[in-house]
Image (tube, coloured by chain):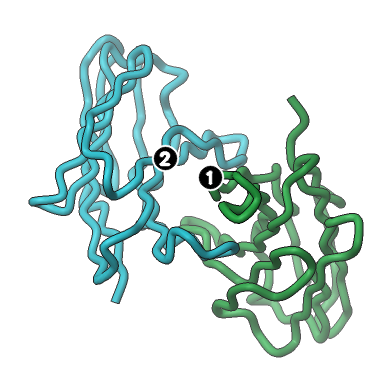
Chain colours: A cyan, B green
């Protein structure tokens, strides 16, 4: 069965600290996608990144970086030099059947990140 | 860039009433998805459509139905509303791999439904 675990329910940091959000997934498929979404207090779900199961390269986008390790079934997200605007709920998600249209996203429970000034 | 449009943004209904939520996908996107997010919870998948055909089905109650129209917009119909249906309802759209897309789901702003 497919499952996404975000063990950290809440994290609080002070501005300029680095923070890593953990994500562990379970799937029996060899082909799948992993995602991170951000949900700020305003409520919308903002797409951050998509990673194909065949692509284990780490990715960096500005202050954001992602570490995908198939050996440990993890897809962790690091924010460098955090800012107050990073305060949000962050969801990790998994999609199996990568070549089938309309496949559901399975979300983790989310990690609430609070960044104080 | 154009985003997913959902209407209405807020809706208040009484128990046992019906509600219709609308979703207009990003232009050229052929797949739409519906999710329900209760307070403090993660989004739960309800149903999806690809090229106007139901593609995947999740934990959608029998009281709910949905369809995708010829212009690719979708509607979620909810009948016999219950207090527990109060939630944020998201629509998402994607361009399918069969159409050269990546299946990344882009979400609309959501419809906040309150059932009294």
Badge 2 element:
strand
What label sits on residue B102 in the rendered view? 1
Q: Residue at x 77, y 43 (%)?
A: B28
Q: Quadrant of residue A2?
A: bottom left
**Between B83 and B27, which is closer to the camera in this rendering?**
B27
Q: Is residue A40 above or below residue B87?
A: above
Viewer-nearest of discs 1 and 2: 1
Chain letter of disc 2?
A
Q: Residue furthest left?
A: A71
Residue A60 point in image, percent of width and height: 30, 20
Badge 1 element:
loop
Q: Is residue B3 above or below residue A91?
A: above
Q: Quadrant of residue A82?
A: top left
* Residue highlighted by disc 2: A50
**Residue A53 visible from this viewpoint:** yes
Q: Residue at x 75, y 61 (%)?
A: B113
Q: Residue furthest bottom?
A: B62
Residue A85 point in image, percent of width and height: 47, 19
Q: Is residue B49 rendered to the left or right of residue A25?
A: right
Q: Is residue A44 rendered to the left or right of residue B43?
A: right
> Residues at badges 1 and 2 in contact (C-beta under 8 Å)?
yes
**Between A28 and B89, which is closer to the camera in this rendering?**
A28
Work out which quarter of the rendered image holds the C terminus of chain B and state it.
bottom right
């Amino acid at each position: 069965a497919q499952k996404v675990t975000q063990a950290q329910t809440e994290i609080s940091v002070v501005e300029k600290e680095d923070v890593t959000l953990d994500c562990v997934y379970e799937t029996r498929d060899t082909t799948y996608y992993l995602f991170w979404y951000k949900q700020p207090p305003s409520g919308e779900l903002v797409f951050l990144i998509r990673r194909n199961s065949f692509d284990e390269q780490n990715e960096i986008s500005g202050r954001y970086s992602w570490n995908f390790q198939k050996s440990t079934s993890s897809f962790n997200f690091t924010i460098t030099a955090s800012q107050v605007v990073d305060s949000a709920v962050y969801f990790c998600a998994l999609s199996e059947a990568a070549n089938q249209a309309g496949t559901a996203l399975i979300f983790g429970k989310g990690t609430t990140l609070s960044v104080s000034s | 860039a154009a985003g997913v449009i959902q209407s209405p943004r807020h809706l208040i209904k009484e128990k046992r009433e019906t509600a219709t939520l609308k979703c207009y996908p990003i232009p050229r996107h052929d797949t739409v998805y519906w999710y329900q997010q209760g307070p403090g919870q993660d989004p739960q998948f309800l149903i999806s459509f690809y090229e106007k055909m139901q593609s995947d089905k999740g934990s959608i109650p029998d009281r709910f139905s949905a369809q995708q129209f010829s212009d690719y917009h979708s509607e979620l119909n909810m009948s016999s509303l219950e207090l527990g249906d109060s939630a944020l309802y998201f629509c998402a759209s994607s361009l399918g791999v069969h159409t050269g897309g990546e299946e990344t789901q882009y979400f609309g702003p959501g419809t906040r439904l309150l059932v009294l």
